[in-house]
Image (cartoon, rainbow, N blue to C red):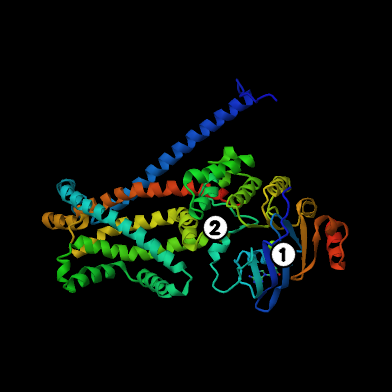
Amino acid sequence: MSPIDWSKPRLRVRGLRKQYEDKVVLGGVDLEIYPGQIVALIGSSGSGKSTMLRCINLIEEISDGQIWLEGEDISVAGIDQDAVRKQVGMVFQAYNLFAHLSILDNITLALKHVQGKTKAEAEEIALGWLDRIGLADKADSYPDKLSGGQQQRTAIVRAVALNPKLLLLDEVTSALDPELVGEVLELIRDLKETGTTIIMATHELSFARDVADWVVFLDQGVVAEEGEAAEFFSNPKQARTKEFLTRLKR
Amino acid sequence: MTELQPQPQPSEAELSRRAFRQTRKRKSTLIAFISTLLFAAAVWFGLISTPGWSRVSQSFFDWPTAVASLPRVLEGLLLNLRVLVFAVIGVLFFGLLLAVLRTLRNPIFFPLRLFARVYVDFFRGLPLIIVLYLVGFGIPGLRLEWLGRIPAEVLGTVALTMTYSAYVAEVFRAGIESIHPSQRLAARSLGLSYGKTMRLVVLPQAIRRVAPPLMNDFVALQKDVGLISILGAIDAVRGAQIEVAKFANFTPYVVAGLLFVLLAIPTVRFADRISAKLASREQAGSTL
Ligand SMILES: Nc1ncnc2c1ncn2[C@@H]1O[C@H](COP(=O)(O)OP(=O)(O)OP(=O)(O)O)[C@@H](O)[C@H]1O
Ligand SMILES: [Mg+2]
């Protein structure tokens, strides 16, 4: 396991608010993520997990607050959003892969067209990753020939291959058949070794306990409790957290 | 595990089922054949029993006239084909351009977006024949000396391209909108710019998806190239018209019509083929 660098936060969020008309989804979120950390974002459905990830990736316009990536304010007016997204990867629940491109081309697309790598360089990187997840023989297949789990693993690897400063995973297993969830979680566990900094919204609590360094519990648009994974699950402090955990356990 | 082997000798029961299917199939073919024959005969007798049939058959289906008029009509058809090729290229280009302009969200592009929208509405409503007249007689009427004398077929190509671009733009736009928003988000979150997302992710998928309706529009365009004759271009229709005047017989029109149909058949078959192929691919799609 690569060590976490506590000297300077990779991501810093202060007073993040998001509202749609008069519905407040995020009511002032504070958060710090350190390089190499894997953070599990948990909370009941509708608590604002996806919204928060989308705000960090600048897909969603924020209503108030500030976000810094490695000390640079990325929420400042007029920021180059494309430049920020080059450094922050995101994988969604479903429909991630480009249907008209082979698995290999899905991975090389951004390497070539965003990072300016040559075809040969891009393919070497892509094949390395495909080999690592055991899909090298599928390089020339199209996404519709892959299982859901294989598709999601490809989508994650496609984002990781770009070496993002931060990788956002939004319930990447929740659209999968139960027997396919394991292989995707295995990949995330594997990514820990590469030192990738990850925030993942998830409903897989046992996995969060197992792999995450840090757990953030979002409730009614604010961080209700956060802490080291082991401590968080074995010894929750807040009544809301206890209630949430027991509700899910049943 | 043992592999399943094909059975060497079908069972008695299977053999009798096969025999039954065989006779049933032969019977169906026979019935279809007889029914078609009877239907054709009914239409034929219905036609020739009309009082004017002998005159119609003489002036529309006269074999010597057909043979004599064929060279000129064929020569005209070559012009139609040339016009078609240029029109298809122009329509694909401008149709796609108009469709993409309509998707731009940046306010700086507002005038372009508005133009695309007004253009599409306008030319979808305007009858092609009026566009042909306006372009065919309007542009030369401007007396732009530096342009010289523009051939009628060029003006016809311009008019066809103007009208069909509007239809095709709508087809492309529907295709662009049918691409799941997640595909766009996935592309953007990989750091691809708006333009690259459009060019590398959205358009390739959209174009594949709309290929069948697009082919349909091109089949329509293929026969509408015959309308350039009204501007005086010597195409298949105009060629037929000249032959009609020469022989005082309408058969050359039938000849030209049949040639257009023959020309359309490969395109139509091709369209069916790619539709079927795409449909089978689309089924799987990129869903989980
Ligand atoms: N575009 C929108 N307009 C209005 N309300 C929205 C919009 N998008 C999200 N919301 C609301 O914001 C709240 C938080 O949504 P969000 O998707 O972030 O929840 P979540 O924690 O990811 O839930 P889940 O676990 O079900 O994915 C929900 O109540 C949702 O209805
Ligand atoms: Mg969500």
Q: Residue furthest bottom?
A: A22
Amino acid carrying mark 1 in the image:
Glu
Q: Which mark is residue A166?
A: none
The answer to which quarter of the image holds residue A32 is bottom right
Cα distance in 3D space between marks 2 and 1: 27 Å
Report the residue at 66% width, 47% height from top.
A149
Q: Which mark is residue B187?
A: 2
Closer to us: A111 or B47: A111
Q: Quadrant of the N terminus of chain B?
A: top right
In what element is the residue under mark 2? helix
Report the residue at 80% width, 53% height from top.
A209
Image location (x, y in percent) of residue A167: 65, 56
Image location (x, y in percent) of residue B287: 60, 52
The answer to which quarter of the image holds residue A65 is bottom right
Amino acid carrying mark 2 in the image:
Ala
Image-based side of A156 in relation to B239, left or right: right
Image location (x, y in percent) of residue B51: 24, 56
In what element is the residue under mark 1? strand
Q: Residue furthest left?
A: B246
Categorize mark 2 by other alpha carbons within 10 Å: few (<14), some (14-19), many (20+).
many
Say if mark 2 contacts mark 1, CB within 8 Å.
no
Read off the chain for label 2. Answer: B
Read off the chain for label 1. Answer: A
Q: How many marks?
A: 2
Image location (x, y in percent) of residue A158: 59, 50
Q: Which residue is mark 1?
A: A32
Is ligand 2 within 8 Å of the beta carbon of the residue shown at mark 2? no
In this rendering, the answer to whether B114 lies above or below B29 is: below
Report the residue at 36% width, 73% height from top.
B122
